[in-house]
């Protein structure tokens, strides 16, 4: 019985280690910091270009792909936000999920 318990413990530990491994849906530590820096650049550019409307836009970055979300007052602001985000160095793709009120 003890032998089965030991093997079961080893199996559980091995599965836990495998589950913690990097997958395509995760970022390495370096990629995480790069994404954080890119998010900050995009957010600063949005606030600089759009003024107070830039504060209403949330920015998330994953592997150089930026997602914009939030609520704005006009279609023009929504479009301009995507253009501003795409113009930031390092951004490869912009997903615009901003909703016009």
Image (cartoon, grey):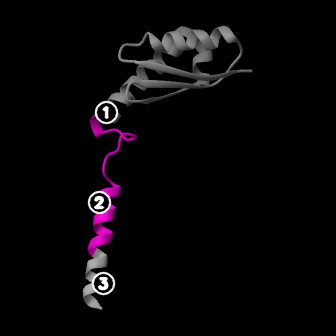
Please tell me how crowded label 1 is: few (under 14), some (14-19), or many (20+) other residues with Cα within 10 Å. Answer: some
Please tell me how crowded label 3 is: few (under 14), some (14-19), or many (20+) other residues with Cα within 10 Å. Answer: few
Q: Is residue 26 on the magenta stretch?
A: yes
Badge 1 element: helix
Extreme residue toward the bottom, this view: 1
x, y percentage for residue 9?
Answer: 30, 76
Task: Work out whether residue 8 or residue 29 is closer to the camera in this orientation and state it.
Answer: 8
Residue drawn at x 36%, y 26% as measured from the top left: 37
Residue drawn at x 33%, y 70% as measured from the top left: 12
CB under 8 Å between discs 2 and 3? no
Q: Which residues are magenta?
A: 10-31
Q: Which residue is mark 3?
A: 5
x, y percentage for residue 13?
Answer: 29, 68
Is 99 left or right of 44, judged from the image as shown? right
Q: Quadrant of the C terminus?
A: top right
Q: Which residue is mark 1?
A: 31
Q: Which residue is mark 2?
A: 17
Task: Using the image, determine if residue 97 lies above or below residue 82.
Answer: below
Q: Quadrant of residue 33?
A: top left
């Amino acid at each position: 019985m003890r032998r089965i318990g030991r093997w079961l413990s080893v199996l559980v530990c091995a599965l836990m280690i495998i589950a913690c491994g990097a997958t395509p849906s995760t970022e390495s530590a370096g990629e995480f910091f790069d994404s954080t820096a890119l998010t900050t650049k995009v957010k600063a550019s949005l606030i600089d270009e759009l003024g107070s409307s830039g504060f209403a836009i949330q920015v998330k970055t994953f592997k150089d792909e930026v997602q914009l979300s939030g609520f704005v007052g006009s279609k023009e602001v929504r479009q301009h936000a995507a253009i501003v985000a795409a113009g930031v160095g390092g951004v490869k793709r912009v997903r615009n999920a901003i909703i016009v009120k």
